[in-house]
Image (tube, grey):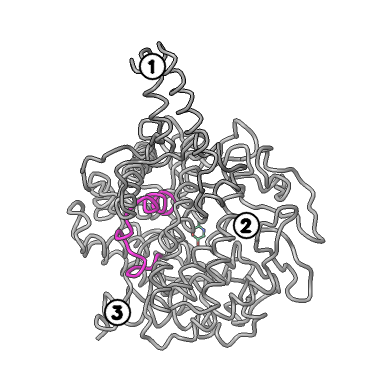
């Protein structure tokens, strides 16, 4: 970073600084006349007095007849007056003038140091979260930060260790990498062989995804700490070998949701159904595993699901949230982009991006059709202030619209932006004529939805979003309370129901802010992300270590919930950290983030051959 001394501070550039204000000729004469000894001498004789009066009259004449250039007339009309006022009050002028490039550099330097400080704060938050987990819950899936113990809610594979590891690598926290890495080396193999039932989706996105990303980042020398990269790959492979039973035991291409690790069996969930998002959110991880191991079986099983879904009937590209592994058909007609539906749409575009040269263009087509369907059927505006939101069709096309939006839907702005520019900045994509009209429209929608997601935070008393928001909109007014922040202009647009007021430290909004910042380079996304981070710090940090979920974001102080989800370290803090990093750290043109924020490197044609 350049340390060049600057001629004056940014304050001087941005504001009217008296030190640099240019004085007019008239002001100089008057000042000289009234301050020097000329004044005394001239005024002591009547000729002097006469000459002084003459001079004042002359100057006044010049002043009143002064021709104002056209451009200043417009300026002054808009400022409420021309002529005399202009003489007395010149606009501030700054010597020496900086070229636009130099001003840009100053801006970058200042923003750069602010971002570095903010990144440091996010890194400290990660250290605080990890140290709580390490002290009270090492080896358990999750930390219960209030009761200071661990809990196995995800099958007992030490999910926080694996989910957090690549974040520690990106943050260059070698101590954490060593601790997590040696736990994986020493304990994970035995857990994989002996543990019981796990959820196929959660285990794939958090554990397989985390191991693969750690494998790649440590191979790239992101860190020298921890075991050799092959340890991560071996564990990913052993685990995936068992998880494959979820696919192979099913009578159709749709996998069972649950796998028993120790005896390599699999079965459907108690209601016999799989979530659509779960069955269709395994392909980034398993394709990449096939690529690095050279064994096609993982990707083959996973892609069978998407090829099958391609041929199922849909509603303008939208799909019901349940699918049956026994019949292979969708079940029910509930359509939403929140829980159980979300990452179906995310992986259509991301799996295509992972391996663009493949014959997976059908995924891109399905994505394009789905986005059209979303815009046509689910996007509406709130009242009174026109926030753009994504609602639901609980009874499909034939039923009514529900103005309910899960926080989970806030992945969509980021995905839409990524789908539009394919990870390039908007400027670069435009310069190279790469954006269609539809891409631009989708990017605009992405920006509007990101604002809505941020407002879901800003309308509450704590500055943290509820799990679910309902939007007042044409024909739909909801019963419930507002978010509590009466100073927000949007407080009447959003209603939050009693059971929806909790916050689980979820990542989706900061994920979208990160992607939108990278793509649009608009600094407002950094500001929004920072205010969300500050609210997490204020209301969820637990002194003894870790961060807690909240029961109700609309009251102060909010009641805490005794749970720190693994994705707070795997996703939320990673995205916040990357929001303030240079865009060459995990560039969006070289990596796709799996749905748990584990970066997977894009496979290029040369690598494939
Ligand atoms: C994560 O496990 C993943 O992002 C998933 O796709 C959705 N939910 C959580 C985070 O909220």
The dot on residue 406 is: 2
Horizontally, residue 468 falls left or right of residue 295, namely: right
Identify the residue at image location x=60%, y=49%: 455
**Could you tell me how far apart the alpha carbons at marks 2 and 1 are, in whole angstroms?**
82 Å
Secondary structure of the residue carrying tag 3 is: loop
Rate crowding at label 2 as few (under 14), some (14 to 19) or many (20 or more) other CA atoms within 10 Å: many
Query: Which of the pair 559/51 is nearer the observer?
Result: 51
**Front tag of 3 and 1:** 1
- The image shows residue 360 at horizontal and vertical percentages of 44, 85
Mark with earlier residue (2, 1):
1
Q: Quick check: is 508 in the magenta stretch?
A: no
Residue numbers of the magenta segment: 569-593
How far apart marks 2 and 3 lie (CA) works out to: 35 Å
Element marked by disc 1: helix
Residue that numbered label 1 is attached to: 42
Q: As drawn, which residue projects farthest toward the right?
A: 475
* Helix, strand or loop at mark 2: strand
Q: Is residue 552 something one can see in this rendering?
A: no
Q: CA distance from mark 3 to mark 1?
A: 86 Å
- Residue occupying image coordinates x 41% and y 70%: 243
Front: mark 2 or 1: 1
Toward which corner of the image does residue 127 lie, by quadrant? Answer: top left
Q: x, y percentage for residue 538? A: 49, 34
Residue 583 falls inside the magenta stretch: yes
Q: Which mark is residue 604?
A: 3
Q: Is residue 513 left or right of residue 314?
A: left
- Residue at 48 percent across and 28 percent down: it is 56
């Amino acid at each position: 970073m350049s340390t060049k001394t600057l001629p004056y501070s940014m304050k001087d550039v941005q504001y009217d600084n008296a030190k640099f204000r240019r004085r007019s000729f008239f002001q100089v004469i008057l000042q000289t006349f009234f301050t020097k000894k000329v004044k005394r001498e001239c005024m002591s004789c009547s000729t002097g007095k006469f000459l002084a009066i003459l001079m004042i009259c002359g100057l006044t004449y010049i002043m009143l007849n002064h021709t104002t250039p056209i451009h200043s007339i417009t300026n002054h009309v808009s400022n409420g007056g021309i002529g005399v006022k202009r003489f007395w009050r010149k606009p501030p002028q700054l010597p020496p003038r900086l070229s636009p490039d130099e001003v840009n550099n100053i801006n970058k330097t200042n923003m750069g140091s602010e971002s570095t400080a903010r990144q440091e704060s996010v890194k400290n938050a990660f250290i605080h979260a990890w140290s709580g987990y390490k002290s009270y819950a090492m080896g358990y899936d999750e930390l219960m930060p209030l009761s200071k113990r661990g809990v196995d809610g995800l099958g007992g594979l030490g999910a926080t260790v694996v989910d957090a590891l690549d974040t520690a690598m990106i943050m260059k926290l070698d101590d954490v990498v060593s601790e997590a890495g040696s736990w994986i080396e020493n304990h994970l193999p035995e857990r994989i062989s002996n543990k019981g039932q796990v959820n196929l989706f959660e285990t794939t996105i958090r554990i397989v995804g985390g191991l693969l990303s750690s494998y790649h980042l440590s191979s790239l020398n992101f860190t020298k700490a921890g075991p050799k990269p092959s340890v991560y790959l071996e564990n990913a492979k052993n685990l995936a070998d068992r998880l494959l039973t979820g696919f192979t035991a099913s009578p159709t291409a749709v996998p069972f949701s649950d796998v028993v690790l120790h005896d390599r069996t699999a079965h459907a969930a108690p209601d016999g159904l799989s979530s659509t998002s779960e069955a269709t959110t395994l392909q980034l991880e398993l394709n990449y595993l096939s690529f690095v191991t050279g064994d096609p079986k993982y990707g083959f099983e996973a892609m069978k699901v998407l090829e099958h879904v391609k041929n199922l009937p849909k509603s303008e590209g939208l799909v019901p949230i349940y699918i049956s592994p026994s019949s292979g058909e969708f079940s029910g007609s509930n359509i939403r982009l929140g829980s159980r539906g979300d990452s179906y749409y995310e992986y259509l575009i991301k799996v295509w991006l992972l391996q663009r040269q493949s014959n997976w263009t059908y995924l891109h087509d399905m994505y394009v059709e789905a986005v059209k369907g979303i815009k046509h059927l689910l996007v509406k505006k709130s009242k009174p202030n026109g926030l753009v939101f994504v609602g639901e069709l609980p009874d499909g096309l034939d039923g009514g619209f529900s103005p309910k939006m899960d926080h989970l839907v806030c992945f969509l702005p980021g995905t839409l932006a990524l789908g539009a520019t394919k990870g390039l900045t908007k400027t670069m994509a435009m310069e190279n004529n790469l954006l269609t009209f539809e891409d631009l429209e989708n990017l605009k929608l992405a920006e509007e939805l990101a604002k809505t997601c941020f407002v879901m935070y800003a309308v509450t008393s704590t500055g943290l979003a509820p799990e679910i928001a309902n939007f007042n909109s044409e024909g739909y007014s909801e019963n419930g309370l507002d978010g509590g922040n009466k100073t927000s202009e949007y407080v009447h647009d959003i209603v939050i129901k009693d059971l929806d007021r909790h916050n689980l430290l979820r990542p989706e909004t900061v994920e979208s802010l990160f992607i939108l910042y990278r793509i649009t380079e608009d600094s407002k996304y950094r500001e929004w992300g920072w205010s969300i981070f500050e609210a997490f710090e204020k209301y969820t940090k637990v002194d003894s270590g870790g961060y807690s979920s909240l029961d109700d974001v609309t009251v102060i102080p909010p009641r805490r919930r005794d749970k720190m989800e693994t994705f707070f370290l795997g996703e939320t803090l990673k995205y916040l950290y990357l929001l303030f990093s240079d865009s060459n750290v995990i560039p969006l043109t070289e990596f796709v983030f799996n749905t748990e924020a584990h970066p997977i490197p894009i496979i290029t044609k040369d690598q494939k051959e």
